[in-house]
Amino acid sequence: MSHAPATMGPVTGPAPDPLPGLRALHPRLPSPLQEVEDGAFARRGVRLVLKRDDLIHPDLPGNKWRKLEPNLRAAAAAGARTLLTFGGAYSNHLRATAAAGRLLGFGTIGVVRGDELAGAPLNPSLARCAADGMRLHFLDRDSYRRKSEPAVLAALHDRFGAFHVLPEGGSNALAAQGCTELGRELRGVADTVGVACGTGGTLAGLAAGLGPGRRALGFAVLKGGRPHFLQGTVEELQRAAFGGPRGDWRLEDRFHCGGYARRTPELDAFADAFERRHGLPLERVYVAKLLYGLTTLAEEGAFPAGSTVAAVITGAP
Ligand SMILES: Cc1ncc(COP(=O)(O)O)c(C=O)c1O
């Protein structure tokens, strides 16, 4: 007796990988978990676990890998040879895109906010981008604000020819989908997961991947008004990526310390002490604010005794 189905369609295997070079970079996934004994948490009977996404890849660490990977595959599948993206003068996303271009054979163009920087010596972050082959273009702040408008993009096409656009911060629907895996890796590990938020893509995906009974807390590193503008941004990203709201998530806006890349003496003292206690150098724009916020919440008794909190270490200094 034959078990073959009566009608058989054409034999199809998995779709060919449009960017096999990505796998050859050997990302460290799932990223490691590191439990740390920390007084503020231990005094409340709460466990603290660090999700070491900073160790995924030396050039594409943390959420950079998770957000870029699906976008780079899509770019390759569309036949793109050149990537164009946007960022501030110290953007981690610009640096990661430049590195991805070098590693995977894409040309890269970095559109930098602020034409006052044109002609000035490059800061170390932009110098790294340039060394990785990224062409840098400095845009006045008004045009930069209008960077998704057809007229601004058309002017960039006139100047640079064909390119595939990645959004500022790398956050779009594909990026949010890429970050769901971060949530899935934390299922069964933590009750609450904290992540620092800039453009919101990481939180949108993390929350969607976590599964029932677990909550994601996003710590805004930018000042954003009340309600914080990121609330709507994350909702919109979830709509675009998943068709609607996903997961249990909330934004914390008390720990931006004055705004993007701003610091306070309290934040610096906290970060210095955390580094000393745990021997872990902290990225100061995002990760230090996340840990400062989580620690303050633990001291305030926000996490139930017996629960586990995970902090996503999204980048390295
Ligand atoms: C180290 C680090 N952590 C967190 C974030 C915030 O991620 P998102 O922009 O997806 O909110 C960024 C920015 O992309 C970052 O560079």
Image (tube, rainbow, N blue to C red):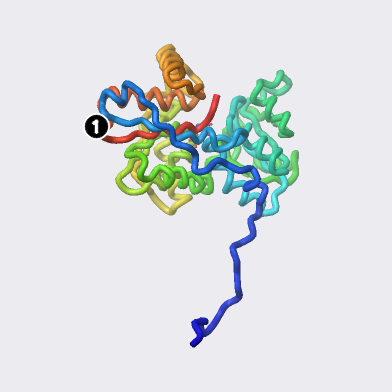
In percent of width and height, residue 55 lies at 54, 34
Residue under the image location 26 percent in, 28 percent down? 45
Within 10 Å of disc 1 (Cα), the crowding (few <14, some 14-19, many 20+) is: some
Q: Can residue 273 be seen in this snapshot?
A: yes
In percent of width and height, residue 220 lies at 42, 30
Position of 300 with respect to 198 (left or right) is: left
Q: Is residue 11 above or below residue 63?
A: below
Q: Is residue 236 above or below residue 13?
A: above
**Screen quadrant of the C terminus:** top right
Closer to the camera in the image, 139 or 256 = 256
Query: Which element is circle 1 on?
Result: loop
**Residue designated by label 1:** 305
Report the residue that reaches farthest toward the front.
1
Q: Is residue 128 above or below residue 72?
A: above
Q: Is residue 302 above or below residue 77?
A: above
Residue 235: quarter of image: top left
Report the residue that reaches farthest toward the bottom.
1
Q: Can residue 155 be seen in this snapshot?
A: no
Does any atom of ligand 1 lie closer than 8 Å to the CB of label 1?
no
Position of 204 with respect to 135 (left or right) is: left
In percent of width and height, residue 248 lies at 34, 43
Closer to the camera in the image, 84 or 73 = 73
Position of 241 with respect to 99 (left or right) is: left
Closer to the camera in the image, 174 or 225 = 174
Residue under the image location 32 percent in, 31 percent down? 47
Residue 160: quarter of image: top right
User: Tag 1: residue type?
Assistant: Ala
In percent of width and height, residue 6 lies at 51, 85
Residue under the image location 40 percent in, 42 percent down? 186
Residue under the image location 70 percent in, 45 percent down? 163
